[in-house]
Image (tube, rainbow, N blue to C red):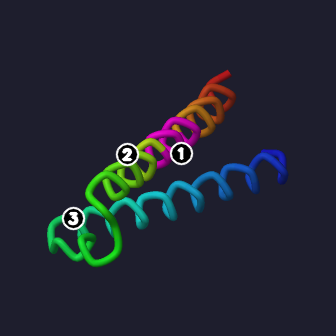
Amino acid sequence: MNTSVQTSIEAVRKWHALAERRRRHYVELYRSERWRRYYSEEAFFLRMRDVIQNTEMWAGILERTTGSREDAKAA
């Protein structure tokens, strides 16, 4: 495997892991209601939506990246 491709996959994995940690943090803020200390309701839910979309975006990129690598191995 090309070193730059492997590095790219690792970078995508790291960004996805960071997005997942951020999402879990916001879920915990929501469950504990600590978000009320820092945000208005509207601002929190807008930010939460962005956090979820970001996590889904990185999950999609990771899926496409690792899926294309698996296709290359099979060929």
Q: Which residue is mark 3?
A: 30
Q: Which residue is mark 2?
A: 49
Tell which tag, 3 or 1, sits nearer the viewer.
Answer: 3
Which mark is drawn over residue 25? none
Between the C-alphas of marks 2 and 3, the distance is: 12 Å
Q: Secondary structure at mark 1?
A: helix
What is the C-alpha distance between the residues marked 3 and 1? 22 Å
Is 59 in the magenta? Answer: yes
Residue under the point 17% across and 71% down: 33
Q: Amino acid at mark 2?
A: Arg
Q: Is residue 66 left or right of residue 6?
A: left
If you read the primary sequence from the N terminus, does the residue marked by circle 1 or circle 2 appear first? 2
The magenta region covers: 54-62
Mark 1 or mark 3, which is nearer the start of the sequence? Answer: 3
Q: Could you tell whether 34 is left or right of 7 in the image?
A: left
Quadrant, the C terminus: top right
Q: Position of residue 1 (x, y in %)?
A: 78, 45
The correct choice, above or below, for 45 with respect to 61 in the image is below
The alpha-carbon separation of the residues under discs 1 and 2 comes to 14 Å
